[in-house]
Amino acid sequence: MVEKKLVNLTPHDLVVLVDGDKITIPASGTIARVQANQIKKDEINGIPVFEQTFGEIVDLPDPEADTYYIVSAIVLAAAKAAGRTDCLAPNTSKAIRDEAGNIIGVPGFVR
């Protein structure tokens, strides 16, 4: 089996906890993002309300053989809509937390 390359395009090192093992995937230094556009549409109790739409993905490299890109959930959704199958997001819905509620690791990825 060919080992896959994992490129972390999030702003933080990612800790994956699997069967008692701690796997750290360092941040690559590049952060994939989705462009956001906002237009003020309303005010509620003096607080502005904006309509937000999303545009292009920024800083997501072209697909490479045997390579997966770790991205945020919003980038994953945009990448899937664009037909990309090489993106993963940390499984934060099942995150392992410390006593203070801080995430110390995730059990894997979502696709």
Image (spheres, rainbow, N blue to C red):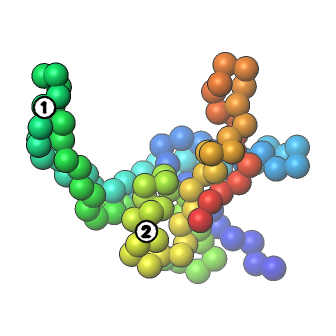
Above or below, 60 against 103 in this view is below
Which residue is rendered at x = 88% and y = 49% of the image?
19
Q: Classify the position of the N terminus by image quarter.
A: bottom right
Q: Amino acid at mark 1?
A: Glu
> SS of the residue at dot 1?
strand
Which residue bears the numbered disc 2? Answer: 79
Which residue is rendered at x = 27% and y = 58% of the image?
54
Image disc number at residue 29: none
**Can you give x and y, in whole percent of width and height, for residue 10 in the image?**
49, 49
**Can you give x and y, in whole percent of width and height, for residue 21 in the image?**
85, 46
Q: Is residue 107 left or right of residue 32?
A: right
Which of 5/33 is in front? 33
Pointers 1 and 2 in contact (CB under 8 A)? no
Which residue bears the numbered disc 1? Answer: 43
The 10 Å Cα crowd at callout 2, few under 14, some 14 to 19, many 20 or more, is: many
Above or below, 100 against 27 in this view is above
Q: Is residue 109 left or right of residue 82?
A: right
